[in-house]
Amino acid sequence: MESAINVLVAQFKTFAGKDGSSQTLSKDEFQTLVASQLPNLVKNASDPSAIDHLMSSLDENNDGELTFQEFWQLIGKLASAHGGFSQ
Amino acid sequence: MESAINVLVAQFKTFAGKDGSSQTLSKDEFQTLVASQLPNLVKNASDPSAIDHLMSSLDENNDGELTFQEFWQLIGKLASAHGGFSQ
């Protein structure tokens, strides 16, 4: 499990480091990440307007950037749905 | 990233399936999972009383079982700390 967690942290950092703050995902970074890394788990992963909407729903403090914790909530929901958990 | 997410879901299910509900982790299942799967990320991973305390802090509805979402919050915190994120 630790190696899988490390992969998720490392991938987040790779995409977060492309522009602006290396600690957070900008909209462009998030769209690139979703399209390339979550093509099956995220519906309409390659549709910028859908991903724009998704990002707005995750960006709790509305600063246009996703923190690791905000991003983690998304993949938790995707994982939970994919795993067939009841919540 | 999807393969890493799938690993986490599959591992959770493997441990959750050992006794009782196959959708949630009992205290025994959680202790076994932490000791074997998160030995480096969780402090005192092999100390049952420390893990008992950790589980209580995660079990939001206090039913003695951890759901996938409750467990996901733990690994998000571990990952965030390990990754050096500011929150």
Image (cartoon, coloured by chain):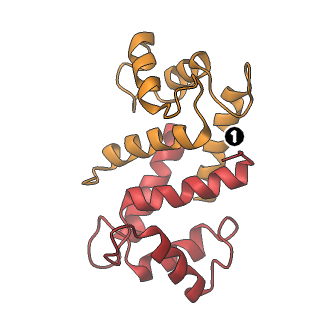
Chain colours: A red, B orange
Left-right relation of A33 to A39: left
Identify which residue, A35 or B16, lies in the foreground. Answer: B16
At x 54%, y 75%, the residue is A54
- How crowded is the residue under tag 1: few (<14 C-alpha within 10 Å), some, or many (20+)? some
Amino acid residing under circle 1: Ala
Horizontal and vertical percent position of residue A37: 58, 67
Query: Quarter-wise, where is residue B79 in the image?
Result: top left
Number of marks in the image?
1
In percent of width and height, residue B82 lies at 33, 43
User: Taking the image as drawn, is residue B28 in sight?
Assistant: yes
Q: Is residue A84 left or right of residue B48?
A: right
Where residue A68 sits, quadrant-wise, is bottom left
On the picture, is B84 further left or further right than B40?
Answer: left
- Quarter of the image with the N terminus of chain B is bottom right
**Depth check, front residue: A37 or B66:** B66
Measuring from the top left, give residue B5's x and y in whole percent: 60, 51
Give me the residue at 49% from left, 52% from top. A7
Question: Which corner quadrant of the image does residue B68 belong to?
Answer: top right
Identify the residue at horizontal 44%, vertical 19% (top origin): B51
Residue B39 visible: no
Q: Disc 1 on helix, strand or loop?
A: helix
Q: In this rendering, is residue A44 above or below B23?
A: below
Query: Residue B53, image x and y in percent?
Result: 40, 19
The residue lying toward the viewer, choosing from B23 and A71, is B23
Residue at horizontal 43%, vertical 77%?
A29
Q: Chain under label 1?
A: B
**On the image, numbered disc 1 is attached to which residue?**
B10
